[in-house]
Image (cartoon, rainbow, N blue to C red):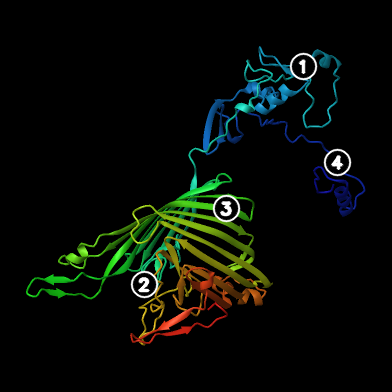
Amino acid sequence: IGDDILRNPTQKEVDSTLRAYKKTDIDSVAVVAISSDSAYTFPLSNYPSSLAESRVAGDNNQLSEVTRQSDEKVLYKMKIDENTLRNRNVSATPTAYAKKLMRESRLTKVNAANGKVIIPASLSDTAKKQNDFFQNEFGNDTTTKKVVATAERADLRDDENVLARAKLFVYKPKKFSADYGSAAFTNSILVNRYQSYQDGQGPVMLTSSTPLNGLVRLGTSDLMEDIKINGAFKIGTNLKDNEWLLNYQNLKRRIDWGLTYYRNTQSLGFDFQRPPVITPGTPPTVTFFLPVFVGGKQFSNLYQANISYPFDVTKSIRFSTGIRSDNRVVNATSAADTFTLKIANDRTLYQTSHLEFVYDNSVVTAMNIYNGARAKIYGDFNRQINKVQFANGPNTYNIGFDARYYYPIYKNFIWAGRAAGDFSFGNQKLIYYLGGVDGWLMFGGNTKKDGTYKYFASNNLPANDQDYAFQSLAVNMRGYIQNIASGNNALVINSEFRLPVFTTLFDKTINNAFIRNFMVTQFIDLGTAWNGGYKGIKRPEINYSNGGPVNVRVKAGGIGPFA
């Protein structure tokens, strides 16, 4: 039409072009064959898996095909079969599933002699040719023969189940990848919150004798996250108080289990009374010595196995048992000091068990911001399995609970309530020191210039009629130092209002993590600790004495028996 050549135009294009050239009819019409070549591709193969890659070298009449099986690639190099390409009907070998369907079908049978599919004569005689339901770009080829599917094996029986003998394809070998890796400064508890009893000395740091430690953590898991291996190394600022942790967890099935090894070295101090020295003479001379303070170390090793069973998404029961070894070694002050050299190591060996029921229906919405409730009830049983030297028996029992509830008020503003208690009994007990907070950075000495205590109330001595094997802290009690009260029983109640300032008051996206998680907290802490039964509950007291005959006891502020 005019100067334009339209190729396969629509009626609308023809009309608009005629109007543009002010014409009423088409100038000329031509039918042109663009190409007479055609290619036929058939995505069929006899491989057990699909093709990942295919390349053709036409000049050399060669073909290469690559299949993938798990993480392995298999390369096939072959000659091009032009006869097969000219015959479009390629006979694909039936899969195991297709064979199963053919065996189960009432319309087909498999000949046990040659493995071929047999169509009953009654069906082949009465069957009528059905017209094709679908159109395709190729013409109907009536010259080719009907394709008959053949089985792979000639001895295949009708009742044989191929899938019953099928095996899972195992990953070989297992693939592991890094889960996490971190390096930081911390003073948090790594494994165990129960520490060997240290004769009422303080302050109590459940990790090591240094207030700040470096922590390196690494974790790895397999491809399906069924196996997790975690490790940690904590080094003290004095380069002597160190901790090691290696943990293996198998999460493949519903029952999870794992193994843990933990080692801790901690610097300690010991008070010893040197025996008097008698010098022969007339009369003999007796020399008495003041108590001496000697440094030392405690080496703790824990070998533990754990198992857990979840009842549902929120409830589970967990059990762990193991062997704990604590070895106290006294440092020799000098080669000539025969007194410290003769002090034997104090080694205790315990079988430890811990059973707990956990309910967790809380959801983490932001850092330290939860919604919902969670609680656990637990029990501990420790039995000394080497010779008992300081108590009437080897057993330590402890039962406790920890319940928390998080109530949303407005956006991320929540109220958090907590109630926790521990009750120890048996021949060897646990002592709980009330006061302080988790993660307290205790730099410097415990005694101030005015003679008062900074971190631990050393003037509140533990009961001398109890045999303690382990010690721990009853926290949080903000506003009080450690050991405002002590005993084998402890109760703590905490109430907090947590307000993330910027994410609650402003409707803007905050990328800076410090500003986004900046929080203001209002808290109320109540707690008490006592020895014996529930009749021994009373308000904690703080003792003051300057060594004279007068000892002043001041009750701590609080409500009822709680400080």
Q: CA distance from mark 4 to mark 1?
A: 58 Å
71, 76: nearer the viewer = 71
Point out residue 527 in the picture as x, y percentages from the top left corner.
Answer: 53, 74
In three-dimensional space, the C-alpha distance between marks 4 and 2, rounded to whole angstroms, equals 110 Å
- Where residue 449 sits: x, y (%)? 35, 86
> In the image, residue 450 lies at what x, y percent?
36, 87
**Disc 4 residue type (three-letter):** Ser
Relative depth, front residue between 451 and 535: 535
- The residue drawn where x is 42% and y is 82% is 543
Is residue 328 visible in the rendered image? The answer is yes
Q: Judge from the rendering whether residue 78 lies leftward or rightward of residue 289; answer left or right.
A: right
The amino acid type of the residue labelled 3 equals: Ile
- Snapshot quadrant of residue 116: top right
491 relative to 222, above or below: below
Answer with left or right where residue 28 lies relative to residue 478.
Answer: right
Query: Which badge, 2 or 1, comes first in the chain's sequence?
Result: 1
Query: Sequence-wise, which precedes: disc 3 or disc 2?
Result: 2
Q: Are marks 4 and 2 in contact (CB under 8 Å)?
A: no
What percent of the width, then of the height, locates residue 162?
63, 25
Distance between the Cα atoms at labels 4 and 3? 88 Å
Disc number placed over residue 28 in the picture, else none = 4
Q: CA distance from mark 1 to mark 3?
A: 60 Å
The residue pinned by badge 3 equals 317
Q: Which residue is mark 2?
A: 201
